[in-house]
Amino acid sequence: MTLGRMQRQQIQELCTSHTPTFSATPGLTERAYHSIDTGNAHPIKVQPYQVSPQAKTAIKREIQDTLQMGVIHPSGSAWASPVVLVPKPDGEICFCVDNCQLNSVTPPDNYPVPRTDELLEKLGQAQFISALGLTKGY
């Protein structure tokens, strides 16, 4: 489907008015706070996985970049989870953390998952559908 001139202009105005939202550089928000309920579990410290020299270089680069951006900071926490590099379809590498051990001591989130058929019904009335990916999710 091709957008008309007015539709292109509206999308351009929307993107321009929210320029920081569409930045390739991650930022911080004060709008939300997240904590992980570990109850009275003893801290879990998982050793880093063995990785290739190339992966080690990529990990060091990612850590340095996110430190410089202020997205992460040094921690003295007793909790530790290993890094995992996951290849993305575009060839880039996604820097992830394996929190399986941490998840094993957290209570389940019982928020119900929306029904797919209901979501599709709502989308069926939409003129446009867009997908946005977060730059970094820490």
Image (spheres, rainbow, N blue to C red):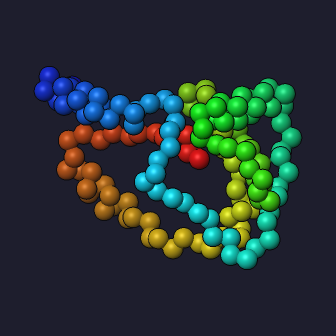
Residue 59, quarter of picture: top right
Q: Residue furthest top?
A: 5
Which residue appears at 68% of the width and 64% of the height? 103
Q: Position of residue 53 (x, y in %)?
A: 84, 27
Q: Is residue 87 visible?
A: no
Q: How many marks?
A: 0
Q: Position of residue 39 (x, y in %)?
A: 68, 75
- 72 is higher (above) or lower (below) than 45: above
In this rendering, position of residue 4 left or right of residue 75: left
Which residue appears at 85% of the width and 51% of the height? 47
Give the camera-side residue of 129 and 21.
Answer: 21
Q: Is residue 116 visible?
A: yes
- 54 is higher (above) or lower (below) than 63: above
Q: Position of residue 98 (x, y in %)?
A: 71, 51
- 45 is higher (above) or lower (below) than 64: below
Which image quarter is the N terminus in? top left
In this rendering, position of residue 67 left or right of residue 17: right
In this rendering, position of residue 16 left or right of residue 125: right
Which residue appears at 39% of the width and 33% of the height? 20
Q: Position of residue 41 (x, y in %)?
A: 76, 73
Give the camera-side residue of 17 and 87.
Answer: 17
Residue 116, quarter of picture: bottom left
Which residue appears at 19% of the width and 50% of the height? 125
- 136 is higher (above) or lower (below) than 41: above
